[in-house]
């Protein structure tokens, strides 16, 4: 199994990559490899089995080519796509004896999802081995119901762009009011009412249309909660990943 962690900057991808690796080792005795595909990773001292920053790093590009962070990130993604055959050689070697491979992805996941390189890489990965994406929703988005609606829509767009199954996870669950969020997700009328309470003026009509759209995406309803800090929800995540691989798997 290969697991690709996706989510906005700060949503907890790197923390969950590391925790999940340790948890799978301890609980199942699995051999787990971790790969960093984020060329812009900063302050990460963890030793990955492969780190894309060996090929290209956003920080180096900013200095060498006098680019801003966004320009350097785009340039880094282009370089990774162009030289991906080199990454594939390493990845093939790392397959040997590995039960699970976990991929950490860029903080600006928008770049990964909207730039051609992200779907390109995912497409390559799924040819190596069965691959599933985990879309992390950052709890700070849950402070407002319209934030949750936006996060769910971003996950729908991500699914549209990526050629792999995607499961939805609220990260940092130790900080979340789970029952409130579950109600928002499972009861579209309640979500619409809560959005209406927000002061978003003329966007209310748009919001209610968006809620209808979300309500019609069945897999969105099966939202789970995990914490890299307390390890809460990792069992559930693991079984959801398995379901995602099963062609008959019903993620609702
Ligand atoms: N309370 C709590 N904080 C977390 C958890 N996971 C990550 N964080 C914090 O959230 C911030 C961003 O985490 P990081 O893993 O770097 O996110 P990334 O940008 O998606 O890779 C860091 O300050 C982490 O310590 C969690 O499960 N619980
Ligand atoms: Mg990170």
Image: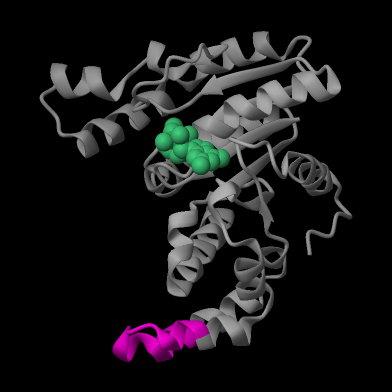
Observer-nearest of 110 and 198 = 198
In the image, taking residue 61 as reference, residue 161 lies left or right, namely right
Residue at the location (62% across, 47% down)? 163
Asked where in the image residue 81 lies, by quadrant, the reply is top left
Residue at the location (67% across, 23% down)? 21
- x then y, percent, for residue 178: 64, 61
Residue at the location (35% across, 86% down)? 203
Q: Which residues are magenta?
A: 194-209
Asked where in the image residue 223 lies, by quadrant, the reply is bottom right
In the image, residue 58 sits, relative to residue 200, either above or below, namely above
Quarter of the picture containing the C terminus is bottom right
Q: Is residue 17 visible?
A: yes
- x then y, percent, for residue 48: 53, 14
In the image, residue 108 sits, relative to residue 46, either above or below, namely below
Q: Is residue 120 visible?
A: no
**Which residue extends farthest left?**
66
Q: How many marks?
A: 0
Quarter of the picture containing the N terminus is top right
In the rendered image, residue 38 lying in the magenta stretch gets the answer: no
Asked where in the image residue 242 lies, by quadrant, the reply is top right
Residue at the location (56% across, 21% down)? 35
- x then y, percent, for residue 186: 69, 74
- x then y, percent, for residue 167: 67, 51
Look at the magenta stretch and give its main secondary structure: helix
In the image, taking residue 128 as reference, residue 192 lies left or right, namely left
């Amino acid at each position: 199994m290969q697991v690709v962690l996706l989510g906005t900057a700060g949503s907890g991808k790197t923390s969950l990559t590391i925790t999940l690796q340790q948890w799978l080792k301890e609980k199942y005795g699995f051999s787990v490899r971790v790969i960093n595909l984020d060329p812009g990773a900063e302050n990460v001292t963890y030793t990955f089995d492969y780190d894309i920053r060996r090929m290209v790093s956003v920080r180096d590009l900013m200095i060498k080519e006098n680019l801003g962070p966004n320009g350097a990130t785009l340039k880094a993604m282009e370089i990774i796509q162009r030289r991906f055959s080199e990454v594939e050689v390493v990845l093939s070697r790392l397959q040997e004896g590995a039960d699970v491979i976990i991929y950490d992805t860029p903080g600006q996941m928008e770049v990964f999802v909207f730039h051609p390189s992200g779907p390109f890489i995912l497409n390559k990965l799924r040819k190596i081995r069965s691959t599933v994406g985990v879309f992390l929703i950052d709890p700070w988005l849950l402070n407002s119901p319209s934030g949750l609606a936006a996060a769910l829509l971003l996950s729908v767009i991500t699914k549209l762009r990526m050629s792999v199954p995607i499961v939805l996870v609220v990260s940092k669950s130790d900080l979340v009011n789970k029952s409130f969020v579950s109600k928002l997700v499972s009861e579209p009328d309640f979500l619409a009412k809560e959005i209406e309470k927000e002061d978003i003026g003329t966007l209310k009509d748009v919001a209610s249309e968006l809620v209808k759209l979300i309500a019609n995406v069945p897999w969105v309803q099966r939202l789970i909660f995990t914490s890299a800090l307390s390890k809460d929800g990792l069992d559930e995540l693991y079984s959801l990943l398995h379901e995602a691989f099963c062609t008959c798997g019903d993620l609702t």
